[in-house]
Amino acid sequence: MLSTLQQPHDTIEAPLFDLVEVIEQLAGARTVEDVAAIVRTAARRISGADGVTFVLRDEDRCWYLDEEAISPLWKGQKFPIKACVSGWAMLNRQTAVIPDIYQDPRVPHDAYRPTFVRSMVMTPVRPDDPIAAIGAYWAEPGAPAPEVLARLQAVARATATAMANVQL
């Protein structure tokens, strides 16, 4: 018999347990770097994305602080806030769902051409006054399932709390 504390891996409840685990990990984060490391790994796992970035707002720039992906993206780079999708998500205080990056004018195509990215979601952290964004990327065009989008937004909400806690 399974312990009630064991996490189911192939059941409908597994995504819920994954989210609980992310929230618990974020509650223990002590630095922004800790938060970024937890988010990049967890968001990729819960979304099935081929890559995830953690982007901080740095006044009028977006700083791609951390990433986990099948090939390098933009870790450590900064871009003008009005010239990238992470900036758009933060400035507009809403999640950007982009099923085909080459069909969306918000995407700076030159920055994406050398990458594997063909579709993406960018979710602001603390939508009322965004301080960061979480990007999830896929190598194939298409929109994520609604439950995947909901999970990414839940991680973003938990991340907002973790970021507030590390600033205390």
Image: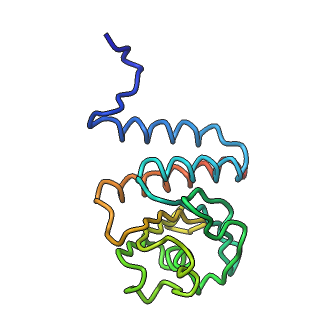
Considering only vertical position in the picture, is 119 above or below 110?
above
Which corner quadrant holds the N terminus?
top left
Location of residue 81 in the rendering, given as x and y in whole percent from the top left corner: 62, 81
Identified at 43% across, 67% down, the residue is: 139
Considering only vertical position in the picture, is 11 above or below 147?
above
Location of residue 133 in the rendering, given as x and y in whole percent from the top left corner: 55, 65
Task: Name which quarter of the figure residue 60 lies in.
Answer: bottom right
Q: Which residue is more in the foreground, 51 or 124?
A: 51
Identified at 64% across, 53% down, the residue is: 36
Task: Name which quarter of the figure residue 66 lies in.
Answer: bottom right
89 relative position to 168: left or right: left
- What is the number of callouts on the image? 0
72 relative position to 43: left or right: right
Identified at 65% across, 70% down, the residue is: 74
Identified at 28% across, 59% down, the residue is: 146
Q: How is the image coloured?
A: rainbow
Q: Residue furthest top?
A: 1
Location of residue 154 in the rendering, given as x and y in whole percent from the top left corner: 43, 52
